[in-house]
Amino acid sequence: MFQWTLERLARDGISEAVLAVNRLTEFYIKQQRIPRSGITIKYSTDPPKKPLGTAGPVKHAEQLLSNESFLVLNGDIFADISYAELLKSHLKTGASATIALCEVEDPSRYGVAELAKNGQIKRFIEKPPRGKEPSKLINAGVYVLNPEVIKLIPAGRAISMEREIFPKLASQGKLYGQIVQGLWMDIGKPEEYMQANRVILDKVKLEQKNKWKTGFNLKTPIALDKGVKIGSNSTIGPYAVMGKNVSVGKNVHVAESVIFSGTKIEDNATIVGAIIGEEAVIGQNVKIGHGCIIADHAKISKDANLVDNTSVCPAKEVF
């Protein structure tokens, strides 16, 4: 997901990105050896045990930002929009902030904008009660800010961009919106994350059958990373994603699932519609149903049957 975003930023002429992260996230990203996109990456690390909300991290990164308009992207948004067009719209109106807006059926989960004909946002309301929304146009999690907006953000404490900064800018007539078309998804929930993976697989049309020996069945679309091993008579796909060095035994069926790196799936296991974390062990004859989430280093012992929407915590064992 992160690589997807970097590639589209580079496509639109962005040369530098500042990641507002905690120390664990920074460490994890650096370990991933993400392919080069041409973008220089810098890190702004939040203070330990002191969440800064959605606006605080922008303030915290102030010293790394240039004295020009800049993009802010939420990390749980999967989109294929034109950042160049958004920047162009922002500069044209002279706004202090411009929000990318997307139309959805149920806007009550999001920040909702009431948009004037000239693109000015008259009101911005975060998560209004269902049926009380001023429109179906929501904050798409991508916006452009001028440097003066940073001055409105108090330092050293948690502050909400959506509840405190955007409404203030709207009341001053300095907040504008740009309706975006094309692919946009919120991946803040597991089911949305899974849907995003389906969209990616359909879009990139990965075809890997010719790279593998016979003896098992691959049903595209799938994505298999380096070092994946698959036993005889197993069926992988459709819509299966496997990270590095995943090991799959004999007579295994994996579909509509994301399997993270280093996981071992033993003989006769069935996994459909699940997320399996790193270095997990799935025992023989195990059945894992739709909506299950197995965290890193968990072990599901032989013959276990996990019903739909079961979650297993990190390093726990299920007998």
Image (cartoon, rainbow, N blue to C red):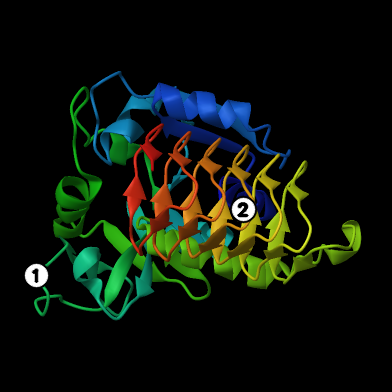
* Residue denoted by label 2: 4
Image quadrant occupied by the C terminus:
top left
Q: Position of residue 226 (x, y in %)?
A: 77, 43
Give me the C-alpha separation between circle 2 and circle 1: 33 Å
Look at the numbered disc 1 and give the secondary structure of its residue. Answer: loop
Residue at 47% over, 68% down: 184
Label at residue 235: none
Against 87, is 296 above or below? above
Depth check, front residue: 191 or 295: 295
Q: Is residue 237 visible?
A: yes
Depth check, front residue: 87 or 110: 110
Against 165, is 99 above or below? below
Residue at 76% over, 64% down: 233
Circle 1 Cα neighbour tier, 10 Å, few/some/many (<14 / 14–19 / ≥20): few
Q: Is residue 143 visible?
A: no
Q: Position of residue 204 (x, y in %)?
A: 71, 67
* Residue denoted by label 1: 129
Is 161 left, or right, of 140 in this rendering? Answer: left
Q: How many marks?
A: 2
